[in-house]
């Protein structure tokens, strides 16, 4: 018997090497800044898990990033992962901007400090542990998993 792929009480065994974990994420904020929430739906084979949380004073971008962080943190071992986000900020940040920020000592092309550097550094460390493909999906467009992640994030604001 092999160890489970995902933490947080997800007991998954007999993992095949070609299995892909899919993580659907969303963040929400009431005011920007203001109280915020993040939510995610994780799928691996026939298993599904939902996670959510929030902060009293935050921004929408930080909650979008936290959803991805929490999803990746839930993985117990190196995995092939597809992350789906409706945040261009997260998707472009990880796919296009991150390498340049690091090369410039966490400065933008305009030589200003990168916003949310703490979370970008955390995402950078987490993505180095996995084989990840990031996908952008249009928000509030009827994508079932994105709609569920949004509902989880919105509910987390009220908690």
Image: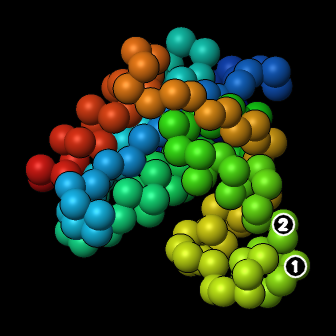
**Could you tell me if the residues under marks 1 and 2 are in contact, i.e. CB atoms within 8 Å?**
yes
Q: Residue, x 82% and y 25% (percent of image)?
A: 17
Give the CA separation, mark 1 to mark 2: 6 Å
Q: Which residue sits furthest right?
A: 103
Secondary structure found at label 1? helix
For the question of whether residue 126 can be seen, the reply is no
Secondary structure found at label 2? helix
Toward the viewer: 14 or 42? 42
Q: How many marks?
A: 2
Q: Crowding at label 2, few (<14), some or many (≥20) Cα neighbours within 10 Å?
A: few
Q: Which residue is mark 2?
A: 99
Q: Residue, x 38% and y 57% (percent of image)?
A: 60
Q: Residue, x 68% and y 57% (percent of image)?
A: 93
Locate residue 86 relative to residue 153 in the image: left or right: right
Q: Position of residue 120 (x, y in %)?
A: 63, 68
Q: Crowding at label 1, few (<14), some or many (≥20) Cα neighbours within 10 Å?
A: few
Considering only vertical position in the picture, is 65 above or below 112? Answer: above
Toward the viewer: 44 or 111? 111
For the question of whether residue 137 can be seen, the reply is yes
Q: Quadrant of the N terminus?
A: top right
Q: Which residue is mark 1?
A: 103
Q: Residue, x 69% and y 50% (percent of image)?
A: 92
Toward the viewer: 93 or 65? 93
Q: Position of residue 99 (x, y in %)?
A: 84, 66
Q: Position of residue 158 (x, y in %)?
A: 12, 50
């Amino acid at each position: 018997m092999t160890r489970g792929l995902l933490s947080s009480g997800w007991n998954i065994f007999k993992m095949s090497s070609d299995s892909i974990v899919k993580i659907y994420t969303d963040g929400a904020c009431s005011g920007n800044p203001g109280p915020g929430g993040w939510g995610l739906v994780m799928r691996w084979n026939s298993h599904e898990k939902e996670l959510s949380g929030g902060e009293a004073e935050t921004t929408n971008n930080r909650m979008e990033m936290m959803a991805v962080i929490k999803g990746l943190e839930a993985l117990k071992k190196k995995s092939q992962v597809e992350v789906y986000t409706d945040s261009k900020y997260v998707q472009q940040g990880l796919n296009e901007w991150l390498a340049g920020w690091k090369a410039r000592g966490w400065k933008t092309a305009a030589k200003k400090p990168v916003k949310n550097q703490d979370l970008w550094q955390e995402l950078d460390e987490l993505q180095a542990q996995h084989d990840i493909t990031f996908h952008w999906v249009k928000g509030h467009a009827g994508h079932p998993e994105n709609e569920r992640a949004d509902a989880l994030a919105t509910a987390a604001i009220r908690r």
